[in-house]
Amino acid sequence: MNKMILVRYSEIHLKGKNRGFFEKILAHNIQEAITKFGAKVSKISGRYVVEGYQDDEESFVIESLKKVFGIYSISPALEIDTNSQSIQDVVTQIHLPLSVSSFKVAVTRADKSFPIHSTEFAAFLGGIILDNNSHVHVDLHKPETIIYVDIRENKKSYIYHEVIRCANGMPIGTSGSGLLLLSGGIDSPVAGYQLARRGMPLHAIHFHSFPYTSDLAKQKVIKLATILSEYTGNITLHMISFTKVQEAIHKYCKDEYMITIMRRIMMRIAEIIAKKNHLKAIITGESLAQVASQTVESITVTNHVVQDLPIFRPLIGLDKDDITVIATKIGTFETSILPYEDCCTVFLPKHPVIKPKLEQVEMEEKKLDIASLLQEALDSEEILETKNFVEMI
């Protein structure tokens, strides 16, 4: 008898001949998540098994597995050799708490060589539990507890009662990598989470305006990236000074176009850094009509400066409540609402244009030496790795 954790995946089952590629990466990501506990992952048919951890670390292993994209659910279980008597011996030891009044037994017989049919064996095992737990009754439709017996093709059976939902999605590393525009707000970490959940490894870029913004704002962004990296693995964070850009826009351009021009220059810089690092997409936390820079017209004008890469906006159809729910779930919300301003709050116009016209924006940009501003911003780049900041969280 062996205590372990049974790991299931869902979407990978649909990958046909490419399934092995996804399974291999998922196994690697699971091992990365559990190595610190001395645990190991192994493959069985349609499942993974995690074992080798200490009993008092099981809850920590579970929390780590819940953050691995590609895992649909997990179950702490007992693994035993498959035979009827061994399964009966384990079930005989099940004593349900007095707070539980109903149960059922669910048998899955993936190993068709096992001689007893699933329904028949479930009824038999249910009878054993009834004999040893006089306070419960069988409810096949809405039981308070389900005892699962999973008889697998590897001649092992797994007995458990808990099914813990996990992050699901696709394993990190199965999609091309992307560059996340990471501000200090609620939205952008959620956008990064949503794309990483589809298998996309992340770099992040943050624009700061020191001395108009404080070092605390920078530390806030590092912490957000570090929290996000619990799901994504290490994130390379590109810190860019945007002060000179904003000062130039404020000095030479009409106030109402400041946000639009600022976003366009950010996108230019983001594309340069993405291509330099062989990244395949740019990711933003924009939500349609949430602010002036997120109207259809503003987004269209902003997109115009990006030449070669797709821009992913995974939150485009979500409202603030939707986004806040996800931010709370993944643990970024409390950090995001800390009152440290980012560069987007510097020199804000009273009445930003909400339906900018490309021709007018380009006329305003001609007042700037865009090439010099880009180069100065790129020269300020500071590169950080979230793996070096894990103690912050």
Image (cartoon, grey):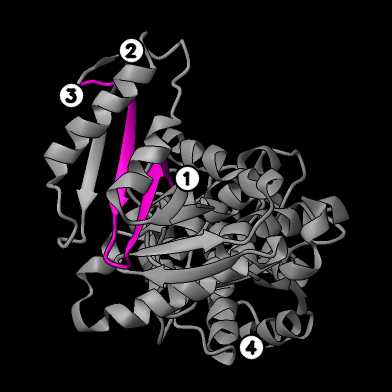
Counting residues from the start of the chain, the first of labels 4 and 2 encountered is: 2
185 versus 388 height, above or below: above
Residue 23 at x, y percent in the picture: 37, 75
Compute the Cα span from label 4 to label 2. 75 Å
Q: Which mark is residue 291?
A: 1
Q: Badge 4: few (under 14), some or many (20 or more) residues near its Cα, within 10 Å?
A: few
Q: Residue at x 65, y 70 (%)?
A: 234
270 left or right of 305? Answer: right
User: What is the x, y in percent for residue 186?
Assistant: 58, 45
Separation of marks 3 and 2 at Cα, in angstroms: 13 Å
Q: Earlier in the sequence, mark 2 or mark 1?
A: 2
Discs 1/4, front: 1
Mark 3 is on which residue type? Leu
Question: Which residue carries the number 3 mark?
Answer: 140
Q: Amino acid at mark 2?
A: Val
Residue 303 shown in magenta: no
For residue 136, which numbered disc appears in the image?
2
